[in-house]
Amino acid sequence: MAIDQQGLYQTVTDMYTMVDRELGGRHQPFLNYGYDLRSGLAMEQQDAAFDIHAQLYHYVLRTVDVHGADVLEIGSGRGGGSYYIKQYLGAKKVVGIEYLPQNVSASRDSFGSVNNLEFYQGDASNLDIEVSSVDVVANIESSHCYPNLERFFEEVYRVLCNGGSFCYADLMTPDMNEQVKQITAMLPFELTKVEDITDGVVGGLTLANQRKLSLIHELDISEERKAWWINEWACVGTPIWQDLQKRDLMYMHYVFKKM
Ligand SMILES: C[S@@+](CC[C@H](N)C(=O)[O-])C[C@H]1O[C@@H](n2cnc3c(N)ncnc32)[C@H](O)[C@@H]1O
């Protein structure tokens, strides 16, 4: 078991280290698949290029009052989601915890000047965060990387204050979805929302497709690596995109409240 866990940490490190290196310093603040909100989002001009990815955050946090809240994002990637929660949803403070040091650096480079928005390196399964200290936890498209889902949900429960909310969304197999249901049913959470948002995410993939392809073709990498990016980012027609259509992979969204 310990070897498998180390293996997954290494895979995540290798994969996102490569992604960071190949981006070559480009401003790419989101790594998620995006969401088609249909109504769109009113964003400042400098942020609007990434609106499809921000729309996933908007949708997943929409039922929770984030305004004035202390928010923890786990798996904050390159910082765009934590920035969206702070600047556009009006959180009092947002802390982003991210495993890959290079992504923490990219987040600080992009958003380090924003007040009450902080990024730290850390592990979702072992958070250096006080008990019952956070009003809202957000976790978007990251948990499928975690070797121990149970530990992760226990950590979320531990750091949330009583009555606090956990806004969660991820790409998963039907088996992983069953595991999520089983683990969360064992914790004193109230389930306030569960939704299969695969169609909205596939809509987001379609809307962002051209922009992602243009970026990938701009990268100074081999054709083989371009093909890898196209599949990993689930561009239209790729195996991952097809699995989402067939629901061999699904994109699930849950909101839990700590009782
Ligand atoms: C697909 S990206 C999504 C990032 C961000 N939430 C977004 O929507 O742009 C997944 C992120 O999870 C991070 N991650 C993977 N395992 C982690 C762990 N054990 N603890 C914290 N972050 C982790 C990865 O480094 C990566 O940045």
Image (tube, helix red, strand yellow):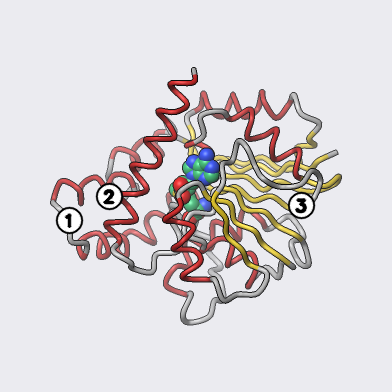
CB-based contact (under 8 Å), mark 2 and mark 3: no
Label 3 residue SS:
strand
Label annotation for residue 221? 1
**In the visual, does 118 lie left or right of 109?**
right
Vertical position of residue 204 compared to residue 2: above or below: below
For label 1, the crowd category at 10 Å Cα-Cα, with few meaning under 14, some 14 to 19 and many 20 or more, is few
Q: Quadrant of the C terminus?
A: top right
Tag nearer the camera, 1 or 2: 1
What amino acid type should be assigned to the residue bearing mark 2? Answer: Trp
Looking at mark 1, is its residue's CB closer than 8 Å to ligand 1?
Answer: no
Residue located 71% across and 46% down the image: 166
Residue 63 lies, in percent from the top left, at 72, 55
What amino acid type should be assigned to the residue bearing mark 1? Answer: Ile
Mark with earlier residue (1, 2): 1
Q: List the single residue furthest toward the left.
A: 223
Label annotation for residue 134? 3
Q: Is residue 170 visible?
A: no
What amino acid type should be assigned to the residue bearing mark 3? Answer: Val
Residue located 67% across and 45% down the image: 128
Mark pair 1, 2: CA separation: 10 Å
Q: Which residue is mark 2?
A: 229
